[in-house]
Structure formats: C-alpha cells, structure tokens
Image (spheres, coloured by chain):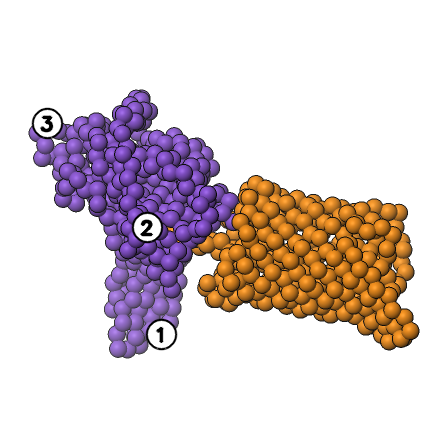
Chain colours: A orange, B purple
C-alpha cells in the first residue's frame, strides 16, 4: 500500500553548476538528472501518528474510543543512472502499522508496495531547469492484508520540473512534481499526488540546507468508506501537508536529512504528524 | 571566497590582455552637485531586427540649469557615417530629462554609436554598439579551396612526430583534492611543448575523468589550474612560443603573431594549432581520462584556438570560444587597429612581402574558415565593444558553425566576457558530459 503521509523522499541539494575549474556537483536526487552509472542509496526510518481524523466533509474529529493510528516505515530508496537521459528508480518499504483504541489494538507488519520505475530526463531550460517524466509500477509484496494496503498492482505517471538558482544571497533549488496513479481494480483508486519543495543552501560549501515542502494526495474511488483500523486501505480521501527538512552533507558520498511534517487539511483521512530521518549514500 | 578567487585566476590566464570596461555613462561632480548621463539600449543584448532604439537620460543635481545639446553619431564598425542627430536640451536645476532615439531601416550588421552631451557645465561622450539581425551576417570573403587539404597535410606531418609524452608529478603544487603534474610532448616540427594537468584525488583507481582543455591567450604563460572540482581533469597547455614552451620562438610580444607569416607552411600558428591537436593526442594516451568528454575552451587567442582545434580535430567534444581573435581577418582591415596593424607593419618591413600575400596566407588560419568544420556543440561569448574581436567578424564566424551552437552577447563589454558566460559554460559542459 502506498498512501505515504510522511513524504519521505530525497530532497535534492542544489546542483552546484558553478564555474570553470571549480565545478562541483552536489545533487543528491529528486527531480534532477542522475549521473550515468552512479548509484544512490537512501535508507530511511519514519514515524507517522494520528489520533484525529477528518470526515468526508472535512470536519476534524478525534478517533472513537481514544483511538490513534501510528506507523513506522523502514524504507530503502535507490536511484541508478542508466544513461544521461534515463534513471532507474526503486523504493522498498517495510511498515509496521498500529491502530489502537481503549479495548482494541491491531498491529500489522510487512513489506508493502515495491515501486520500480524509469525516469526520463526530457529537456532543460538553460541547463538550469529540468523537465522529467517518470513511469512507475507498483507491486504489492503482500496478499490480502488491508492493514498494509490495497494489495493491488498499479501504475503511476509523474511529471517533474526542478531547478536551481541564486536567491537570498545563496543557492536555492526547487522541485515540483505531480503524479497520476491508477490501481488496477474496479474501485481503483485513481490518485493525484503532488509535491512542491523549495530549499536553500545555508553555506557556500553546500554542507547544510533547509527546505520546505507542500504536498498532498487526492484519491478518488467509488468506495467511499473510511476505516481507521485499515488506514492504508481507504480509497476515497485527500489531504495536504507541509513539511520542513534539514540536510547536512558530510561528504559528497554521505548526507543525512531530518524531516518533520504536519497535515493541514484533509478528507476521510487522519490528521497526521510525521517525522523521519534519512541517509543518502553514494557508493559510486 | 576560494571559488571566486579561482575564477579570477582562470579568466586571467585564459585571456589575452588586461581589459577595461567600456564607458557606462558619464558623471561630473561639483561641490554644488553633478551632471550624470546614462544610455539605455532597448534590448538586453543590444540586438534589433530593424529599428534600433535608445534612451539617453541626463540627471542634473546642480543648482543651475544646464542648456545645450544632446546628440548621437552612428557609424559602421569601420567608421563610415550612417546617421546623426542633434537636439537642443535644457535640463532644469535638480531635475532629470530623458530623450528617446529611434533609428529605423538599418542594414544587417553591427554599428557603433556615440551619444554626446554638451551643456553648460558638462561635456561627455558615451560609446555603445548594437547589431541588426546579426545571424544574417556573412563574410564577404571566400575560403581557400585547398583549406582542408592544407590542414590534413599538416596533421599528417604531425602524426609522423613521435610524441614522447612525459608526465612529471609536481607534489609541491598538489592541493588538498588535486594532484598536479607537468606534462610535455613533442609536437609539429619536433617542437617541445609543455603544460600542466591537474587530476582530482580519488581512491577509485579505475575512475576516468572528463577533461577540460584550457587553451592559452596571446603570450600568456598558463599555470596549473586547481580548484574544488571533483569530476574534471584540467589540462592547460602552453603552445609554442609561450610560457614554458617558448623554446626557439623567443620573440617579442608583438612579433609572435607575425612570426614567419610570409610562408603559410612556416607560420607560427600552424604549429600552435598542431600543439593543441597533440594535446588531444596526449589525452587519448591517458587511460584515466575520458576520451569522449573533452571540452576545449579559451579566451581571445585561446578562443580562436578552441575554434581551430575543433575545426581540425573531431575528437573535441565541446568547444567554447570567448572573444576569439583572428576571425574573418580580411573583414577586420579598416575596422580594427590590432592585429591588422601588426601584419601591416611586418609586411612593410619584409622585402618582397605584401599585405595581400599576408592576408592570403592568413586565409589558412582564419577562425572563420575553421568554423564550417566545427561539428561539436559550440558556445561563444562576445563583447559588442571589443576592439580586437569585433562583433561583425565574430558573427561572420559563428554563423558558419553548422552544429548545435549558442552565442552570449555582452553589449557593454569590450574584450571580455562576464561570469555569466562561465556559469553557462559550466552548466552546459556538465549537462553534455552528464556530470550531474
């Protein structure tokens, strides 16, 4: 199941296209092109918590019987540059979901949805702004376990636009992406997933950066029900969230990111708060 | 900042002369105030499709009115008068005035325009240049029919010279992240050529680096280029008669350009261009260098060499020329002082040598004539006020390049380009070499 609340994904540090002879590349991932034959690995751990939910009218209520939902996600994200234009992308999450009420507790753990895709570097503007298209296949690694997700195969087409520039006296970057995802079943769902990130490098050595993101899901299905105990199996919902991230680069090969996020609006979904720590490793 | 300092060094090394910024406007200050002027060209690159338009602004902060005239004189790049206009003006005390000028129906080409102000307490002239449909500019002169044959023969002769590549570590010049080497090789006429190579330190013994080949400006002694880059090997080559490769061509600065121009087989630039080719041979001989990721770049004579090298050696993958000299040379006669003055002076002092013969030989070394063979992606930077590499001649060369190309125009600069060009060059190179 792929209803990700934490939006744990790699935040691209600015692509440091600098000057002759002092060129450095500090792009870590995201909506930027990837160097051929280079590998990026990003293990991460994230925590999501909600004890309130928005109903179908967007009204916020506590879960019944002091209920709360929590989720730990251990994930490996990877990118491999195939050629100058094409990048292989994969994501493998292991999730432990817990829904607990006064007299009820349900915990489910397991590998959820494997995502594998190809990203195509379509074009650029002035070698500064990049257009990408990514196709992804969603493959459930579990069977008939609604506590982990839909258990459905799906596909996603994602459009990405990213770039870097000078701003506020430092180097800044942005990434905009919108994905259209369809799960294969009579009730879908069809989802529109969007995310916008703006980041600033805090020093000229590209060691430290902060970024703010706004993202969300709009999931539509003829199945309108909302079951908190099967949080990731709900199909008709929407939410928007903001997140703040700090990244520190120890070297070109090793960085760490800490991210916190909070839902700001929703429908048929929990009012989530999240936190995550991710590493970025570039072995070659 | 370290990077900034480095840029200054690089720009300095790869350029020919010390440059000065063109006059941006005038100002006269008195205790009671001043008069200042500014010319605004109504196009960011100074390029128009037909009608050129300008605004001449005058600011008077003095305590008295300023009366007199504002005028312009428009000439071709060769100084032929095209148009002029003069208007009477009166700028009240502590006030500003702006005057709009439009000049219609101009022919394709570049023009010089001088804006003059002559008022009660202030006289000044501001020089500007602009272009009309420059991508339509074509040289009036032909390429020698045997141009390619001449250069193939030259390369064949070079191939007979055993290169004897030699690499000498210079550990005292190593930086935190780079190893520095002196390189040397035998080139055309068995001339000994020296240069430097700096390579990022890496634990990966199999890693291959893309190459930035820095070509020298006129009589510039190139030094090793270091810096923070982790992806590029940087080679700087001192071609014959320059810096550490001076050798027997140990002539005075002015005489280098005309060295043996009376014979195109012996002209110094024949060897200089082959020195660049030999440097590509060197790159191809090194297993730790990418043979398919070579950027040739330089300013002034280095820019010329970037065109010439890409024109005679298809192993160059990217070419970047900043303010290249020696482009459309015949078109420069009557248009510029240097380098034509040096050729005229030399022709006048050599028995039996005529300027016609010099120009005839120079046809084999004209950047324009190499341009048609530049098949790799190419970028060029020019200054509209460049007195050595005028925009007409630069465009006459640029327009002939058949492949993917881009030109960056600096309307207020002379024989120089700004850091914007180097920013672009870096991004362009990284994108082409997939050094993301």
- Residue A143 percent location from the top left of the image: 85, 50
Q: Please tell me in which quadrant of the rendered image residue B238 appears.
A: top left
Q: Nearer the viewer, mark 2 or mark 1?
A: 2
Mark nearer the viewer, 3 or 2: 2
Q: Position of residue B364 (x, y in %)?
A: 27, 29
Q: Is residue B104 visible?
A: no
Q: Which residue is drawn at the image coordinates 53% and 62% (left, top)?
A: A249
CA gap, disc 1 and disc 3: 65 Å
Closest to the observer, A213 or A11:
A11
Q: Relative to A192, is A61 above or below? A: below
Give the secondary structure at mark 1. loop
Q: Nearer the viewer, residue B429 or A280?
A: A280
Both marks 3 and 2 on one chain: yes
The residue that appears at 69% across and 52% down in the rendered structure is A91
User: Visible in this render: residue A82?
Assistant: yes
Q: Chain of mark 1?
A: B
Instruction: Look at the picture and state if B352 lies above or below B41.
Output: above
Name the residue that disc number 1 marks: B94
Q: Which residue is under mark 3?
A: B352
Residue at the image point whose x is 86% and y is 66% from the top: A106
């Amino acid at each position: 199941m792929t209803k990700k609340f934490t939006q744990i994904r790699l935040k691209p540090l600015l692509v440091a296209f600098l000057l002759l002879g002092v060129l450095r590349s500090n792009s870590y991932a995201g909506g930027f092109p990837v160097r051929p034959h280079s590998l990026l690995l990003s293990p991460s751990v994230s925590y999501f918590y909600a004890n309130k939910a928005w109903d179908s009218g967007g009204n916020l209520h506590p879960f019944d019987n002091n209920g709360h939902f929590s989720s730990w996600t251990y994930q490996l994200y990877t990118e491999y540059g195939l050629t100058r234009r094409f990048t292989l992308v994969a994501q493998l999450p292991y999730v432990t979901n817990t829904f607990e009420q006064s007299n009820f507790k349900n915990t489910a753990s397991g590998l959820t949805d494997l995502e594998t895709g190809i990203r195509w570097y379509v074009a650029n503007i002035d070698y500064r702004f990049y257009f990408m298209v990514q196709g992804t296949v969603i493959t459930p690694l579990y069977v008939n376990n609604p506590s982990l997700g839909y258990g459905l195969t799906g596909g996603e087409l994602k459009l990405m636009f990213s770039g870097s520039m000078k701003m506020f006296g430092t180097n800044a970057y942005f990434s905009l992406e919108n994905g259209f995802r369809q799960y294969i079943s009579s009730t879908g769902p069809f989802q529109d997933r969007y995310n916008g990130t703006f980041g600033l490098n805090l020093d000229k050595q590209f060691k430290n950066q902060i970024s703010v993101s706004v993202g969300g899901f709009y999931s539509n299905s003829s199945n309108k029900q909302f079951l908190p105990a099967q949080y990731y199996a709900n199909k008709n919902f929407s939410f928007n969230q903001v997140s703040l991230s700090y990244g520190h680069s120890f070297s070109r090969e090793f960085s760490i990111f800490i991210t916190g996020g909070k839902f700001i609006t929703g429908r048929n979904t929990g009012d989530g708060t999240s936190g995550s720590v991710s590493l970025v490793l570039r072995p070659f | 900042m370290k990077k900034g300092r480095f840029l200054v060094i690089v720009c300095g090394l790869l350029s020919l002369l010390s440059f000065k910024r063109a006059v941006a406007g005038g100002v006269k200050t008195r205790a009671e105030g001043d008069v200042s002027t500014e010319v605004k060209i109504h196009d960011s690159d100074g390029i128009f499709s037909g009608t050129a338009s300008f605004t001449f602004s005058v600011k008077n902060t003095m305590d008295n009115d300023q009366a007199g005239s504002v005028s312009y004189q428009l000439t071709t790049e060769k100084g032929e008068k095209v148009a002029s206009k003069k208007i009477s003006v009166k700028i009240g005390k502590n006030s500003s005035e702006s005057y709009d000028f439009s000049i219609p129906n101009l022919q394709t080409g570049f023009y010089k325009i001088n804006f003059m102000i002559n008022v009660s307490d202030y006289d000044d002239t501001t020089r500007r240049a602009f272009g009309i449909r420059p991508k339509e500019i074509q040289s009036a002169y032909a390429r020698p029919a045997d141009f390619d044959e001449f250069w193939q023969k030259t390369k064949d002769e070079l191939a007979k010279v055993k290169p004897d590549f030699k690499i000498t570590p210079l550990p005292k010049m190593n930086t935190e992240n780079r190893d520095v080497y002196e390189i040397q090789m035998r080139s055309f006429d068995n001339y000994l050529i020296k240069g430097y190579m700096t390579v990022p330190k890496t634990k990966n013994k199999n890693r291959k680096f893309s190459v930035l080949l820095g070509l020298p400006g006129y009589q510039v002694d190139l030094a090793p280029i270091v810096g923070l880059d982790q992806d590029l090997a940087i080679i700087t080559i001192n071609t014959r008669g320059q810096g550490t490769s001076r050798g027997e061509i140990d002539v005075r600065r002015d005489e280098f350009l005309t060295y043996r121009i009376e014979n195109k087989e012996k002209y110094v630039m024949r060897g200089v261009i082959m020195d660049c080719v030999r440097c590509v041979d060197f790159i191809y001989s090194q297993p730790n260098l990418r043979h398919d990721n070579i950027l040739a770049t330089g300013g002034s004579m280095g820019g010329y060499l970037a065109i010439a090298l890409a024109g005679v050696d298809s192993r160059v993958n990217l070419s970047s020329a900043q303010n290249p000299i020696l482009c459309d040379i015949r078109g420069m006669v009557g248009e510029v002082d240097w380098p034509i003055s040096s050729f005229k002076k030399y022709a006048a002092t050599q028995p039996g040598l005529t300027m016609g013969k010099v120009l005839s030989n120079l046809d084999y070394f004209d950047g324009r004539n190499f341009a048609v063979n530049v098949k790799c992606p190419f970028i060029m930077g020019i200054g509209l006020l460049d007195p050595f590499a005028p925009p007409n001649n630069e465009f006459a060369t640029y327009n002939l390049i058949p492949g993917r190309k881009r030109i960056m125009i600096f309307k207020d600069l002379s024989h120089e380009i700004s850091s914007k060009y180097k920013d672009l060059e870096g991004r362009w190179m990284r994108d082409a070499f997939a050094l993301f």
